[in-house]
Amino acid sequence: MMKRRPIVAVLVTLAVAFLLTSCNEQEGIASISAGSVFTCSLQADGTVRCWGEGTYGRLGDGPDVSSTRPVQVEPITGAVQVASGGTFACALLGNGTVRCWGAQFYGQLGDGVGGLDPGLWSGSATAVRGVTTAVSVVAGSDHGCALLADGSVRCWGNNQDGQMGGGSTLPYYTTSGLVPGLTGVTDLAAGGGHTCAVLDDGTARCWGRNTDGQLGDGTTTKRTTPVVVTGLTDAIAIDASGNRTCALLADGTARCWGDNSFGQLGDDTTVDRTTPVAVVGLADATAIDLGGNHTCALLEGGTGTCWGRNSFGEVGDGTKIMRLTPTAVAGVTGITAITAGSTHTCVELAGAKAKCWGHGGQGQLGNGTTVDSVTPGPIMKPTIVGNIVEVSPASDHGCALFGTGTVSCWGDNAYGQLGDGTTTDRLTPGPVAGLAEVRAVRTGSTHTCAVLLDGTVTCWGRNSRGQLGDGTTTDRSTPTPVSGITTAVDLSLGNEHTCAVLDDGSARCWGSNSDGRLGDETTTDRTTPVPVTGLSGATAIAAGWRHTCALLADGTVTCWGYGGRLGDGTSDTRPTPGPVTGLTDATAITASALHTCALLADGTARCWGNNDGRLGDGTITNRLTPVSVVGLTDITSITARYGNTCAVLADGSAHCWGEAGDFAAIGSDLPDDQYTPVPVYGITDAATIATGGMGSNACVVLADHTARCWGRGLQGSLGDGTLGPRPFPGPIVSSR
């Protein structure tokens, strides 16, 4: 598992599809690194993609979920090298810093966190402390090291075998430490529990675990400081994996030492070696890379050769026969680099593409399957859903409206809220049965509704309080017409109630009426729509958890229901509409469980209700009347979420504020709650923010009509094929 590659400048033009992007070959690959049961690639644009086994967050896209196709590591930009290890991976950035992601129970991310707790991991990249001038990075099973510009080395992570090289008996380093006395290093490698370096005089040093002679000093004695590898004088590169090491020599041959149980040393035996032995028949090699129990080399002319264990076809010769000496990789030419994982192998090809083969059980081949392959196959891109007009995310499910007028939903389906005629959860979008000519779609906590082009409304999902409006309290798994609504122009769903604005400026609400949220002067639940008392001139409506607000044509806002969120200067509950104090030029409104916000004509926003940072005024003070969101202008759309608020600006950026942590919907790697807006990572071309406020997820629709979502992600509610939280925006996909 060699962990560093030459920086390759590759110019790739990627066509943006307006409709569903086809599942085609991943392009723009500048380098590739095979880890234990996962693989990562450096892209020509400086981003990183990973695929395969996702436990411990080693794919770097947020959740600890596996993927059979590449997913983007966040937040990584400006990367120049990627290194995949056993339970983690790292990227070297162009500024000389290193960021790592994955398991951190041995401190292998170098960010100061560790503690021999298998629950410690990070699904997003964090900075390695103390590394600022790195020129390459390597990742072993549970430790990492960086080669610095001055030829010195810093390491972090597991030190139970002395692989930090400092003579220390500490079990792990949570931040990087300098390897004392080591200078003039030109190449570096990290194995299962040992580390090795090539010096500028062609000699090599190794330290750490030595159970099989992998340090090459003629013994099996553990070393906590570097020792000389016996007999090497013209080494130019080195790699390590498990309990063995190999060095590439200046004449194109190679020497290997250590564990040889499967013939992985290439000397035509299965005898362990405590000093370097020649790889039989290998010549004209330009690079060498070590997998779990197999070894591969790149040859002049762009061909590859491998040897050792071949139980999954990882040698690439079309068989599963163990090879004790180098055997040609079949059917692949134009190879520019080769990398070996535990039981799989990948090659970089001319044209910025790659192929992989061997064990695919965790998706590490990147071909969209979990099937083994004895022959090389291409890496396939995820299928990103396009042609999206709007997205509505709720607590545990979400829906998208397409330009075709159809709707697809994903996530929790316990009450049939996905509308597909089942109660089966979905991790990716599936079509709502029989629904067409849709104008708008909205999600509530556990139900969904759509306004059709003819002004009628149809709903599905949970109906415990009559929120589907069909005159019953029976759950529905397919769309069911709402009684008596024929001229709807806007719609909003709360926790257990639903409201619609009609084309005459009146409004109708139905479902739970606790706290008077239906606005009909009572607290009686309604299974069919009832008029909101005294409301006229309404142009839009926003249903919160226990309250409702309407935007009027004159730019004022009126609210009713549970007190403290109504913006009228009191904490009183109201069963009929009352004006929000001080708003005269609102153009849009949004409501969630605990607060409400309005977008104003000048591009600013005001919010009121329960705060904890979600009002964006720089405090955590609850507000009974609207207060200005600090520092944002040119807002084009805004949405209130359960614990926070998000907005899209005219420049295409998105900003969020409020609770971070477990609810993770601010789209930033900032660990603390934010009382004023902060940019959402990686969003530069947003067209609009998603509607609906009954959850802890957020989505934006981009200018290309794809969508990116982030947040808590329960029950697959982000539509990205995963079940876990995502702190940074990720695409809605039809396959992962």
Image (cartoon, rainbow, N blue to C red):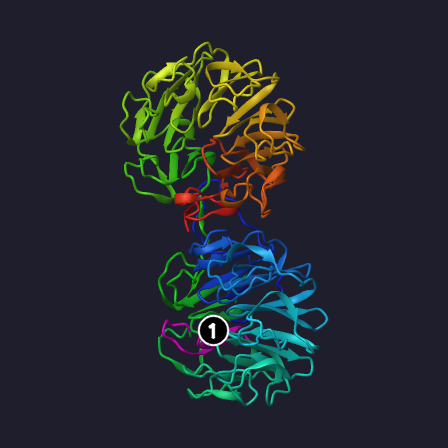
Residue 132 drawn at (x, y percent): 69, 62
Q: Nearer the viewer, residue 180 or 37?
A: 180
Q: Residue at x 28, y 25 (%)?
A: 473
Q: Residue at x 61, y 40 (%)?
A: 674
In the rendered image, the vertical position of residue 342 relative to residue 215, given as above or below:
above
Magenta-tinted stretch: 289-314
The answer to whether residue 3 of the structure is visible from this angle is no
Residue reaching furthest right? 150
- The amino acid beneath tag 1 is Gly
Whether residue 173 appears in magenta in the rendering, the answer is no
Whether residue 309 appears in magenta in the rendering, the answer is yes
The answer to whether residue 734 of the structure is visible from this angle is yes
Q: Residues within 10 Å of mark 1 (few under 14, many from 20)?
A: many
Residue 68 drawn at (x, y percent): 41, 57
> From the viewer's perspective, is 291 left or right of 318?
right
Q: Residue at x 46, y 35 (%)?
A: 391
Residue 475 drawn at (x, y percent): 28, 30
In the rendered image, the vertical position of residue 523 relative to residue 8, given as above or below:
above
Tell me the residue that label 1 is attached to. Answer: 291
